[in-house]
Amino acid sequence: MPKLQVLQAVGQLNYGGIEVWLRRLLECCDPAQLGFDFLCLADYDSPLKKSLEQLGARVFTTSPGRLKKTLGEMLETGHYDAVHSHIWMRSGLALGVARSAGIPVRIAHLHNTDDGKPRTVRRRAYLFMMRRMIRRNATCLVGCSQAAVSIIGAAESAGSANRLVMPCGFDLDYFSRRPHRNEARKIFGIPGDATVIGNVASLTAQKAPLAFVDIARGIASLIPDSWFLWTGDGPLRNRVEAAAHEHGLGRRFVLTGVAADTRAAYAAMDLLLFPSIYEGFGVVVAEAAVCGLPTVVADIAGAREAASLASGSRLYEAGNTRAGVEAVIASLGSSGNLTAEGREILDIHEQARRLGSIYAGESP
């Protein structure tokens, strides 16, 4: 069978869920049978970009305003069997270009249920148009959850009727090879006997880190030895640091920054608190469960589906600080795990096999 070449269209190459998942897929694939190139809508160097290139991928960059022109030129001069677009509603535009170029396999992959932008009249019109373009131009629609798939609406063509749910998976054995708890806590300067509540996410409005601080304040008033660990970075870092200081959490609130390897963070925790205000899925809930942690998850679409695959997961009313505190207190001391269904759905090796078949033109 000749080697398949796939162009992955992404918004950025940070250590986020989508980008790390794509790197994991690339690691699973036989380079003699399947190759990835990346078209990124941001031009900057990052450690993840370098690691993708070390795995044999080529990384190209453009800007959102030049997407149509750059993609058209790439598809005209290169040889691609499939275009797999991860750029949310812009996938409608990208896959329209791919369709005009005669690319036989065109995948729109929805990784979120919202983008956090105000729904002005102009914005609603744009989203309506892009949804329609996705339905017309995609040969396959993939969502990280049923909630993500459903935002596109009903199919308008036979091709876009090919829909499936595929969250960002991972190697299920990877997280079993994590440090001992006390060893992990030494890395972050946390006492071995502390009660540690944590999260792994960017410091952005979507991930609600300020809500996490509010819940942390309530927990700290009830559990004197409690510490709080947030792995990730973003534009809200200064506000989060200020809020933690204002609430008297001081050195007990640890911001680690971005981590390429999050196993030490999970190993240091007693519980994962996931307070996002919107989500496509929330793979960190599943990763924490594999590490044996109970999880407390805001009851929102997408994240609710992740919690359903994690035993020891408890939902609370999103935005309700008191409910979040009560859920954490009730869950401490318990344990978590992935359900059998979760292990099947999130197995990265099975996902790589299934996507390889789709890239080859087989029905999902």
Image (spheres, rainbow, N blue to C red):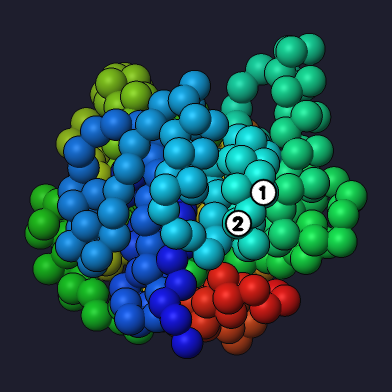
Snapshot quadrant of residue 164: bottom right
Q: Amino acid at mark 2?
A: Ile
Q: Which residue is mark 1?
A: 99
Return the residue nearer the eye: 32 or 317. 32
Point out residue 310 in the picture as x, y percentages from the top left corner. Answer: 57, 71
**Residue at (49% x, 21% y) in the render:** 65
Does residue 235 appear in the picture of this structure?
A: yes
Is residue 276 left or right of 27 when viewed as pictured? right
Kind of element beneath mark 2: loop
Within-10-Å neighbours for mark 2: few <14, some 14–19, many 20+: some
Residue 57 position within the rendered picture, expressed as x and y whole percent measured from the top left: 29, 60
Q: CA distance from mark 2 to mark 1?
A: 6 Å
Q: Is 282 above or below relative to 183?
A: above
Q: Is residue 218 above or below residue 308?
A: above
Residue sitting at x 64%, y 62%? 104
Give whichever of 219, 280 is nearer the camera: 280
Q: Secondary structure at mark 1?
A: helix
In this figure, which residue is indicated by the disc labeled 2?
103
Q: Are marks 2 and 1 in contact (CB under 8 Å)?
A: yes
